[in-house]
Image (tube, rainbow, N blue to C red):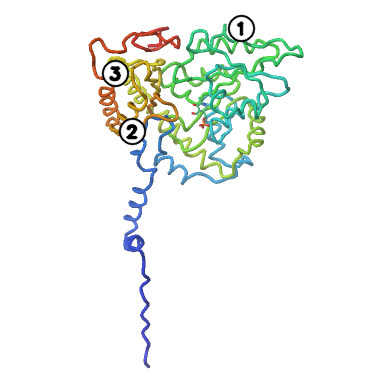
Amino acid sequence: METETITLEKPRLSPTITSLVDSTDAQLEERFFSSLAWSHSNESSNDFRSDFFTKPSLPMLKAIMTTSLGDGDMGEDETTNSFCRYIADLVGHDASILTLSGTMGNQVALRAALTVQPYEILTDYRAHIVNWEGGGASGVSGALIRQVVPSNGHHLTLADVKQHATLTDTYYDAPTRVISLENTLYGTIMPLSEMRAISKWARERDPPIHMHLDGARLWEAVAAGAFTLREAGECFDSMQLCFTKGLGAPIGSAVTGSTAFVRRANWARKHLGGSTRQSGVIAAPARAAVDYVFLSGKLAPAQDKARRAAALWLRLGGKLLRPAETNLVWLDLEGSGLALDEYNDAARRFDLKVGEPVHGRLAFHYQITDAAFARLCEFFRAVLPPRGGGRGGLGVVDVRSGGVANGVAVNGYS
Ligand SMILES: Cc1ncc(COP(=O)(O)O)c(C=O)c1O
């Protein structure tokens, strides 16, 4: 019997697909991982623009791959639930919930804390909730925001709070119902003693004033040895902690507090559309960020680079706007005699990313490499060449004091 041979025409594939077809599984896997942005941090190694210009790491991706996929909105996701218990335990609060961003975390917490109008939130005039959250506290909560200028130029004190809080409740008034502190603020640390004093006073009011902390970078204060997470936790009724600042998670923040408060925060989050379905994909990499970056001690070496950079800048005659107490260094470009264009052009020549969103601020995160740090030092030397006597030096001691600013150690912060 004659058999007909059918020759299948080989499909014409693009060179990329052909090479995929011809690869072994191991080659495919290697190729897959090496082409992932997750698997290396080169893109962020020279990025000093902010500590959120990090790239999520492979452990974070692996955490996503192995997460449970229950419904977060219904409270059914085990990865999310255990992570929320874990974060609450780290700060000594009863409970926590995930939010999509730090802004959402602050807004959820403020909305949950404020119940019956009229009300006012008292905060530092430089606070993120005042300047960078699209007016959310007024829009979402309808609160008046009492912005206070710290009398010591560095952090709010109990005296500042007492002077500006609205404690009367005539029909003219919007009584202070929340005190919202930020730590770190501009990378500077509010001392534990001050947080304790304000908290004690607030809780002794009738009714007690809710203490909220925007702790987007609380991790940095703890890494600098200022206090523990639990010591900070004791001072607040709610805290917002970012996993994307310095810790490198791709997404997410937590809001912590008492069981009753977090129940209300859950409502506020729902109200804002921030309740998510398979929330394990957020919680899992956030946990990897806390464990592999914060708890494994990766913030301190980055802060060390920040301190050395600040010291070099001052040695070369440059000036700082405020002390470098954690991972942020604030160069006073104008005071150092530098035009912004000159500074930016030189940075590009040294292959350094600086600038927007905040000019003159340098953020040090754990993915900044030694090579990029070395180039930063060369860049400083190029833009601030040594001159007889220097052009900066002691200069004006900024009232935003504490730490090392313009070569002068003030308030014991250095
Ligand atoms: C102090 C502080 N709070 C809150 C936020 C808001 O975080 P997100 O950008 O995730 O909304 C930021 C962001 O940089 C911040 O610096």
At x 53%, y 27%, the residue is 132
In the rendering, which numbered label is found on residue 312? Answer: 3
Which of the two discs, 1 and 3, labels the residue nearer the N terminus? 1
Alpha-carbon span between mark 3 and mark 2: 18 Å
Which of the two discs, 2 and 1, labels the residue nearer the N terminus? 2
Residue 314 image point, x, y percent: 31, 15
The three-letter amino acid code for the residue at tag 1 is Gln
The three-letter amino acid code for the residue at tag 3 is Leu
Picture quarter containing residue 382?
A: top left
* SS assignment at label 1: helix
- In the rendered image, which residue does mark 2 sit on? 46
Q: Nearer the viewer, residue 65 or 397?
A: 397
Image quadrant occupied by the C terminus:
top left
At x 49%, y 21%, the residue is 229
* SS assignment at label 2: loop
* SS assignment at label 3: helix
- In the rendered image, which residue does mark 1 sit on? 163
* CB at disc 2 and ligand 1 closer than 8 Å: no
Residue 156 image point, x, y percent: 53, 12
Q: Residue furthest bottom?
A: 1
